[in-house]
Image: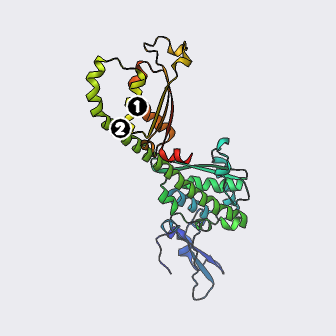
Amino acid sequence: MEKTAHWDCLWVTPYSGVARFPSFVRNRKQPGNRCFHRKKRFYSPTNDWRLWVKCQVDEQKLGLTPELGRLVNSFAAAPDPKLRIQQLLYLAQTLEPLPFQYKTNENKVPGCLSTVHVIGVCEDDKIFFKGDSDAQLTKGLLALLIKGLNGYTVEEIERVSPKFIEVAKLSVSLTPGRNNGFLNMLQTMKNKAREAASKVQAATKGERTYSEKVTQVSSNGSSQTAASSSQDKTENRTVYSSIVEKLQKLNPTKLQVHDDSLEHAGHVGAKGLRSSETHFSVYIVSDAFNGLSLVKRHQLVYTLLGQELKEGLHALRIQAKTPSEVVSE
């Protein structure tokens, strides 16, 4: 007989009764709630009984996460296919509803008999999914995947083999169409995990690039600011000239600054300001904007003109572009 550490996963199925094997009968446990994975037959010399060996699911071989492994073991332990379907339907009830705004074609799982939507977000290098389906059985399969994959890294999710559906004994209870839909759901969730992680990496890179550009601009203009600081104290410069001078730190290939203050004379927001120069339009083209979003470009300009905004500049309309964007136009 093959040795195994799972003695509670052994039971004898006799053909001519169990009286001949009282030790097995006394020591064995009931087969309910046991693992039904990888059954093997062993025959006695008289060939009148068989011993089924059941062992735990090989989570490492299937690349399962700990939580998914636990769920697979739970399904595999069910002795009746109907009980597995009931477990799926129960999981479907526990799935949180997906907000309507996420039910778009972009989040729709292709190749499913039912309509399935799933999204993924990355938080602290861990992926978290949400989803929904209009069919309860499919929704149960989706809930199984979400519950088993939530809170794990992209690498851990990528390692999961779709063959676990066979080990869980669910494939025999599903139609070929639903089996195919399950494969598509798992693959879509892997894709969503990669996309979510990529977005976070891109955002982090953008923040770092923005910080580096702000530091670079500040250091490039530090000597110029120091040289003109004494002159600023004795000379009352206009807001217009100050904007033009400070934006030179971005090394623009094109810079246009227009004073729109007259168009807003008597504006409520401009009352009480010491300066009559309150509204400006800026058109600037610079390589410093490469790799920055529109919001980050505006923030970079606001950073340079922070003092002017505090002392009287009420509104600033900005068009910030890169040289390549101007050429493409």
Q: Nearer the viewer, residue 211 or 116?
A: 211
Above or below for 69 versus 253: below
Judge from the rendering whether residue 302 lies leftward or rightward of residue 169; answer left or right. Answer: left
Judge from the rendering whether residue 297 lies leftward or rightward of residue 218; answer left or right. Answer: right
Judge from the rendering whether residue 295 lies leftward or rightward of residue 288; answer left or right. Answer: right
> x and y percent of residue 244 in the render?
41, 29
Which quadrant of the structure image shows residue 137?
A: bottom right
Circle 1 — which element?
helix
Name the residue rendered at 29%, 32% in the picture: 224
Decide if residue 63 is in sight here: yes
Residue at which label 1 appears:
303
Residue at which label 2 appears:
217
> x and y percent of residue 119 in the render?
60, 49
Above or below for 32 versus 152: below
> x and y percent of residue 117 in the render?
66, 51
Whole-number angstrom distance, CA of label 1 to CA of label 2: 10 Å
Tell me if mark 1 has few (under 14), some (14-19) or many (20+) residues whose alpha carbon lies within 10 angstroms of its own.
few
Residue 153 is labelled as: none
